[in-house]
Amino acid sequence: MDILAEVRKCYQCGKCSSGCEMNRLDPSFRPHRFIRFVVLGEMERAVRDQGLWKCTTCFTCSDGCPQDIPVADVLWALRAAATQSGCASAVTGVQREAFLSVGRLHSIDNKKRAKAALPALPERSDAAARIFALLEKERV
């Protein structure tokens, strides 16, 4: 999948932000803003924005996008770029532990997903632990 081609489909409707649980807690966190940074080629601005670390990976943004843009995946790619460029937030340690324990940073409400006619997501995933194990092997 070509992420850049995907994000170019974004017409900034804001549905990803309006459905975001974190946006309800902190209106300054707007996922569509990060998509816009990518479209405009403002990667440096995107990876330096500490708001990037507020995403809880609930996937509501991706599920609600009328253009089927994988918004959560874009945010994760930006986080990876931020980490590589030394712009990681101190909150990453807490996020790492949560990710290792359940494979995501936000609990999944499959009842809510079913009501929205969305497929169920696994409650638990060992993918995070496998990813970190592979990364540790590469460092040696």
Image: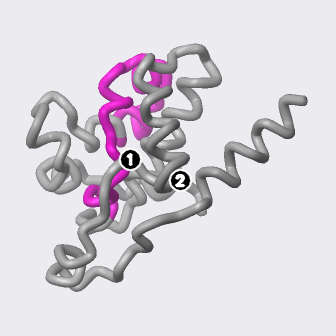
Instruction: Reply above or below: 95 against 89.
Output: below
Q: Give the mark toward the camera: 1 or 2.
A: 1
For residue 75, above or below residue 122: above
Estimate how packed mark 1 is, as few (under 14), some (14 to 19) or many (20 or more) residues with alpha carbons within 10 Å. some
Callout 2 environment at 10 Å: few (<14), some (14 to 19), or many (20+)?
some
Residue 107: x %, y % from top left? 31, 57
Q: Mark 1 vs mark 2: which is more N-terminal?
A: 2
Question: Residue at the front extreme?
Answer: 101
Screen quadrant of the N terminus = bottom right
| Quadrant of res 135 | top right
Mark 1 sits on what residue?
A: 105
Query: Could you say where residue 31 lies in the image, as x and y percent from the top left?
Result: 28, 42
Q: Which residue is mark 2?
A: 3
Q: Is residue 106 magenta?
A: no
Chief secondary structure of the magenta span?
A: helix
130 lies left or right of 111: right
Whether 51 is among the magenta residues is yes
Q: Which residues are magenta?
A: 35-62
The quadrant where residue 38 appears = top left
